[in-house]
């Protein structure tokens, strides 16, 4: 399993940053490796990527949501198999720090070499920086996605 992590501070309020992250259909506008994203059902989307000459398609499922704090997802079909999360922390003066962690399983010698050479870390850094530039230029989502934020079930029986 390979792992990459990157953080960026974005000059925008946490609500705008979080909502833009949920607007998955906008990702091709700011991440050059992402060719297409389509929401296929609530909490599910289909992605097509092109990285270093390799095209990959996969479906993801959102597995955890804490609005304006964290969102986690996992691939459920296709390659590469991966899990990931994005955490959001509000800083002073309407700034938000986004930290993305990606864990994936390299498939074949080329992907294993890419992982060893930290190409995944560079690609993640480029993607998060593209997201930062997009949010700072646009101020928030333009409403492309149909992903619905589901509140976390809270067990009040312990209270």
Image (tube, rainbow, N blue to C red):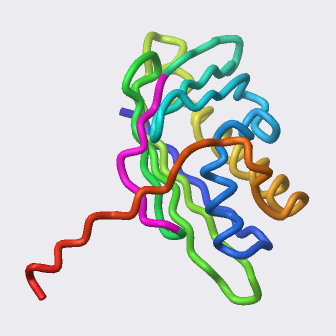
Question: Which residue: 52% across, 21% down?
Answer: 113
32 left or right of 89 in image: right
Q: What is the quadrant of residue 33 in the picture?
A: top right
Give how far across and how far down residue 97 sits, in percent: 64, 70
The chief SS type of the magenta part is strand
Quadrant holding the C terminus: bottom left
132 left or right of 109 in image: right
Give how far across and how far down residue 32 sits, in percent: 79, 31
Question: Which residue: 59% across, 25% down?
Answer: 47
The image shows residue 68, relative to residue 44, as above or below, that is below
Give how far across and how far down residue 152 sits, in percent: 33, 64
Question: Which residue: 40% across, 37% down?
Answer: 74
- Magenta-span inclusion, residue 10: no
- Between 77 and 127, the one nearer to me in the picture: 77
Question: Which residue: 63% across, 12% down?
Answer: 55
Magenta part of the chain: 59-67
The image shows residue 136, relative to residue 37, as above or below, that is below
Give how far across and how far down residue 8 sits, in percent: 68, 63
């Amino acid at each position: 399993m390979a792992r990459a992590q990157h953080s960026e501070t974005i000059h925008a309020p946490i609500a705008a940053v979080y909502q833009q992250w949920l607007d998955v259909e906008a990702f091709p506008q700011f991440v050059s490796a992402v060719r297409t994203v389509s929401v296929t059902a609530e909490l599910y989307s289909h992605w097509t990527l092109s990285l270093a000459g390799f095209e990959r398609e996969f479906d993801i499922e959102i597995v955890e949501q804490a609005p304006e704090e964290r969102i986690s997802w996992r691939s459920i079909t296709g390659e590469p198999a991966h899990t990931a999360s994005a955490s959001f922390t509000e800083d002073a003066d309407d700034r938000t720090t986004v930290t993305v962690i990606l864990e994936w399983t390299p498939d074949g010698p080329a992907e294993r070499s890419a992982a060893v050479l930290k190409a995944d870390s560079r690609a993640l850094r480029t993607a998060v920086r593209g997201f930062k530039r997009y949010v700072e230029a646009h101020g928030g989502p333009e409403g492309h996605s149909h992903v619905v934020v589901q509140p976390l079930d809270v067990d009040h029986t312990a209270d």
